[in-house]
Amino acid sequence: MQKVEVLRQADIFYELPQEHLEKLAAVCREVTCQDIGEVIVQENTPSDELYIIVKGMVDIVLDPGTLGVEVPEGSGPSTITTLRPGQGFGEIGLVDRGLRSASARAAAKQTQLLAVSRDDLLGLCREDYHLGYLLMRNIAADLAFKIRHTDLTVREQLLWKPRS
């Protein structure tokens, strides 16, 4: 796997120069999920890695039972989105060390990922402020996009009324 080329295609590493991509590639580890449904990260566990999808697909899954409220029988975990190559998840863990807001599961056999630990990534940012600036700018843009999408979804659900 050519890690630099994979990173170059990832939204979160948009416009990073070759030298920065090479530094990032050096701290990435490869992860392969053999089967569909294999858990990559679990909701409500510590968040300390960013993942980039190289090959395959990943379902992002929410389990209403983890909220500590009573849920109707038969309403289990729900897939809220499916991510594809070039997309990433876990970026919130780079900003804070909070708990994961959702689980991620392989949605295809032989799903391949690159994983970068929070500590390694922040270490690179401390060593190279320009890399840190570009990376944090891209993370902020990615999170802003996701917040806007969530906001529109919530508004749609709150304001939608069936026609009489």
Image: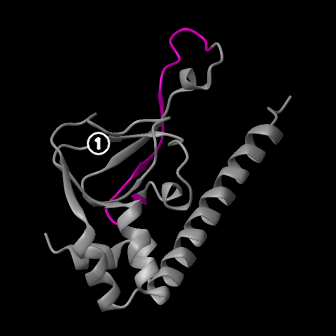
- In this view, 94 is above or below 73: below
Label 1 sits on residue:
106
Residue 163 percent location from the top left of the image: 82, 33
Q: Which residue is found at the position 16% from the left and 48% from the top? A: 110
Residue nearest the observer in this picture, 128 or 164? 128
Quadrant of residue 49 in the image? bottom left
Q: Is residue 79 magenta?
A: yes
Residue 119 shows up from this direction: yes
119 above or below 16? above
Query: Callout 1 environment at 10 Å: few (<14), some (14 to 19), or many (20+)?
Result: many
Q: Quadrant of the C terminus?
A: top right
Q: Percent x, y for residue 96?
A: 56, 56
- Judged left or right of residue 136, residue 123 is left
Please state which amino acid type lies under the numbered disc 1.
Ala
Side (left or right) of 60 relative to 24: right
| Residue 100: x %, y % from top left | 50, 43
The residue stretch that appears in magenta: 71-88
Q: Secondary structure at mark 1?
A: strand
Q: Residue at x 46, y 48 (%)?
A: 47
Which image quarter holds the N terminus? bottom left
The x and y percentages for residue 54 are 25, 62
Question: At 48% across and 77% down in the image, what residue appears?
Answer: 135
Dominant SS in magenta: loop
